[in-house]
Amino acid sequence: MMSDSSLKLLKMKILPALGDTFFMVSISFIIATFLGFVIALILVCCDENGLYPSKYLHKIVSLISNVLRSFPFTILVVALIPFTRTIIGTSIGKEAAIVPLVVALTPFIGRLLEGSLKEVDPSIVQAATSFCANRRQIIRIMLIEAVPSILLNLTTAIINTIGLSAMAGVVGGGGLGSIAIIYGYQSFNDFVMYSIVVILIVLVQFVQGIGTGLYKKTNQ
């Protein structure tokens, strides 16, 4: 039930938690998107019918991506604790949460972007080839043509990042998830816990609305 103390607690904690969540989501998303683009380009270009066919490189990158994607996030966070401590110096806090977030998101985003690039009409690539475009120019054309799909998939990725950042709170990652666990669930305060859920839902709807709007503008 809602009480004055619960409302006061929520007001005191919500802004710092939102800031921590924004920090985790933005930094991890930017890094994972960059790495995901690299993975997507390797998977598309090194395919047997790609611009740079390489059977073994394609298989290695595909296998690593699939293995990382198969880990439940909470298990991945625990498994990466030694690695996180080596890089960050600690395994607790918003900075430490970025490491497992990037590791979990990179193959996910890579596969999404791979799908976007493979959706490009092959006739466009053939037309570019007929005009003597080199392989770098063809890749640039593919990226431009895939922009609407890329935006839509990146929207999905951001939403997934928000969800994972909340899960990171279970293992001391900070942010909204940590508030929900410590001051909500563990303190038997349903008001705080469900208030965080509502905030996360609003964030997801906000991001989805922006992503959908950008998709429509670029797909006209």
Image (cartoon, grey):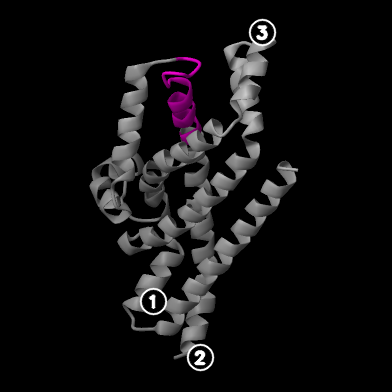
Identified by mark 2, the residue type is: Asp
Query: Which residue is depicted at the point 63% across and 52% down?
Result: 211
Q: Is 15 drawn above or below residue 97 in the view shown?
A: below
Identified by mark 3, the residue type is: Cys
Q: Is residue 12 left or right of residue 170?
A: right
Residue 70: x and y in percent read 29, 46
Q: Nearer the viewer, mark 3 or mark 1?
A: 3
Question: Dot 3 corresponds to which residue?
Answer: 132
Disc nearer the start of the sequence (3/1): 3
Q: Nearer the viewer, residue 97 or 92?
A: 97
Q: Is residue 205 left or right of residue 46?
A: right
Q: Nearer the viewer, mark 2 or mark 3?
A: 3
Question: Dot 1 corresponds to which residue?
Answer: 183
Query: Which residue is depicted at the point 67% across and 17% down?
Result: 127
Q: Nearer the viewer, residue 197 or 98?
A: 197
Span of residues in magenta:
36-52
Identified by mark 1, the residue type is: Tyr
Question: Dot 2 corresponds to which residue?
Answer: 4
